[in-house]
Structures are given as C-alpha cells and as structure tokens.
Amino acid sequence: AKRNGANRVQCFTSRLQVDLEKHLNIEKGLRHALQNDQFELYLQPKWWLSTRQIYGFEALIRWRLDADHLVSPADFIPVAEKTGLIVPMGEWVLRTAIEYLQTWRRLGLDKQFIALNVSPLQLRAGCFVEYLADLLNKTGISPDLLEVEITEETLLDPYSDDYKAQKDLGRIRELGVGVAIDDFGTGYSSLKYLRQFPVDVVKIDKSFVSAEAEGLAEPEICRAVVTMADSLGMSVVAEGIETDKQLEELIAIGCSKGQGYLVSRPVSFKDATEILRAAADS
Ligand code: C2E
Ligand code: CA
Ligand code: CA
Ligand code: CA
C-alpha cells in the first residue's frame, strides 16, 4: 500500500510538472506572438434567423503557429488571463476590430458591426474603457458598430469591489457601445444580476442549442431565455445553430437572431469582406 501511495504521489508530481511546463511554454509563445504579430482575428457572421441575412460579426481570436496550425483560444485564453497577457492581447483585438470597421467604411460596406469578447480580468485589470473611448475618438468609428460580449462571471465580479464591473459596463453603454451577456444560462444567479446590470443582448449558450440531436438540445431553456429577455426588453442571439431543425425551432419560440455553422463558421477578414461584397451586390 505504501508503495502504491508513493507511486501515486510521483504520478501526481509529474503531471503537475507537465502542466507547469505546458503553461510556461504557452506563456512564452504568447509573448512572442504578441511581439511578432502572430494573432489573427476571425469573424463569425451573425444573422437574422428568418432571412439568414447577415447583420454583423463576432470577433474570435486565433494564434497562428505556422501555415497549417491555428491554436484555438480555449487553449490559450486561460493562460493569458493568469499571466495578465490578456490585457495587451485584448487591446490588440480591439485595435484590429476597429481597423476592420475602418476598412469596411472605406469600401462602403459599413452597415456591419463587430462584437468583441472581453474577459472579466481584462475589464478589471486594464484601462479597457479608456482605451475603447480613445480609439472611438481617434477613428470616428460609430460606437453602435461595436458590441462587447461578457460572461455572467463578469457581472458577479467576486474578486474586487462589487461596483467596478457595473461601473465599467455602465460607461461602455454610455459611450454608445452595446453590451451582450455571453453563454447565458451556464453561469450563476443570472436573473438577479440581469436586473441589476441592464444589458442590450442575451446570448443563448450553444450547449442549449446543439448537441447530438437534430433539434434543439434544450428547447425549454431556450424558450425561457427568450421569454425572459422579451420581458426585460433585451434582444436574444442563439449561438451554435448547426441544423435546419434547430433554426426552425428557434424561430418558432420567437428567437430572431443567431450564429452557427449552419450559415458560417468563423472566417478570415478577407473572407468576411467577400461575404459582405457578395451580399451588397445581390
Ligand atoms: P464564445 O465567445 O462562446 O464563442 C463561441 C465559440 O463557439 C467559438 O469558439 C466559435 O467558433 C464556436 N462556434 C460558433 N458556431 C458554432 C457552431 O455552430 N457549433 C459549435 N460547436 N461551435 C460553434 P472559439 O472561436 O474556439 O472561441 C472559444 C472561446 O474563446 C470563445 O467562446 C470566447 O470565450 C473565447 N475567445 C475567443 N476570442 C476571444 C477574444 O478575443 N478575447 C477573449 N477574452 N476571449 C476570446
Ligand atoms: Ca462570445
Ligand atoms: Ca458564447
Ligand atoms: Ca463559450
């Protein structure tokens, strides 16, 4: 038994070692990537469910290792948050999204907006709101072309004083930038916080929309979110729509907007621009 115990300890230690090394490698890689312009900002179309007409995009970061390898944000955002690298990374995301909007403005494709993911730590640690206000000022980009997606966790803000997140979100909305609650329903105490912090948009998490089944994974939850958002005067976006059946069911429960592989995966800026051009020509 003693030997088993020792083995177990050793096994645990080496796993920690592997995790630590992986973490350090990712951190080193991220610093290098920031300095060498190795991030790419992909865009996933957001569309009206009834017509599939695109009205905007969600910006999703990727890390380009080489021609064939893109690293998913799920694999590096947690490390970026732990190390504080999320702050310069988030500023890069914001600058890049605004550059995209400026390019579309030049091309006359300027009716589109971009939603950005902002993590709780990013909002707390940096001067995100100042940075945002400054960029809007300098570029003259209309604030209603941007939206910020935050998770319920941000509203909870259990780490620092309770009013900080509320204040920042209020200032973001005062600038004229929309606020959306991401992954709605997967967090904690949703309703109470939604009443306290008014937001513009609620996003139904993709785990309620698609799973193995053809139809909605959790139709009752989807319906409840739509009803709640309607009564609070918020708009609803369903994410992760993969099948026609899910689309039909969402329309039937009164959801009007969505995202998902059914219409488009996240694409490069070049491809997004082509999509907009094609839509403008038709
Ligand atoms: P999220 O904000 O919930 O983004 C939705 C994720 O679902 C994206 O994964 C998207 O590619 C994926 N997705 C979209 N449509 C479908 C679909 O029909 N089916 C399925 N199965 N998946 C779909 P992605 O791009 O890997 O991003 C993962 C997460 O990383 C995001 O989740 C977001 O929390 C975070 N993230 C991405 N970009 C940024 C960023 O710039 N800043 C921060 N702070 N977080 C980011
Ligand atoms: Ca999001
Ligand atoms: Ca989401
Ligand atoms: Ca998510």
Image (spheres, grey):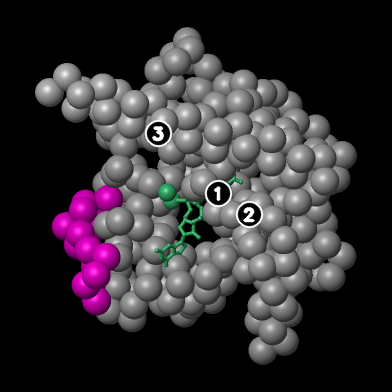
| Ligand 1 closer than 8 Å to label 2 CB | yes
Question: In this view of the protein, can residue 268 be seen by the observer?
Answer: yes
Label 3 secondary element: helix
Direction from residue 158 to residue 99 in the image, left or right: right
Label 1 secondary element: helix
Residue 70: in magenta span: no
Q: What amino acid is at disc 1?
A: Pro
Dot 2 crowding, Cα within 10 Å, few <14, some 14–19, many 20+: some
Question: In this view of the protein, can residue 145 be seen by the observer?
Answer: no
- Quadrant including the N terminus: top left
Q: Is residue 84 above or below residue 69?
A: above
- Quadrant including the C terminus: bottom right
Direction from residue 223 to residue 178 in the image, left or right: right
> For mark 2, what is the residue?
62
Q: Position of residue 42 (x, y in %)?
A: 64, 60
Q: Residue at x 16, y 57 (%)?
A: 220
> For mark 1, what is the residue?
73
Q: CA distance from mark 1 to mark 2?
A: 6 Å
Q: What amino acid is at disc 2?
A: Arg
Dot 1 and dot 2 residues touching (CB under 8 Å): yes
> For mark 3, what is the residue?
15
Q: Nearer the viewer, mark 1 or mark 3?
A: 3
Q: Residue at x 43, y 76 (%)?
A: 262
Camera-nearest residue between 233 and 2: 2
Q: CA distance from mark 2 to mark 3?
A: 27 Å
Q: What amino acid is at disc 3?
A: Arg
Q: Nearer the viewer, mark 2 or mark 3?
A: 3
Which mark identifies residue 148? none
| Ligand 1 closer than 8 Å to label 1 CB | yes
Q: Residue at x 69, y 41 (%)?
A: 29
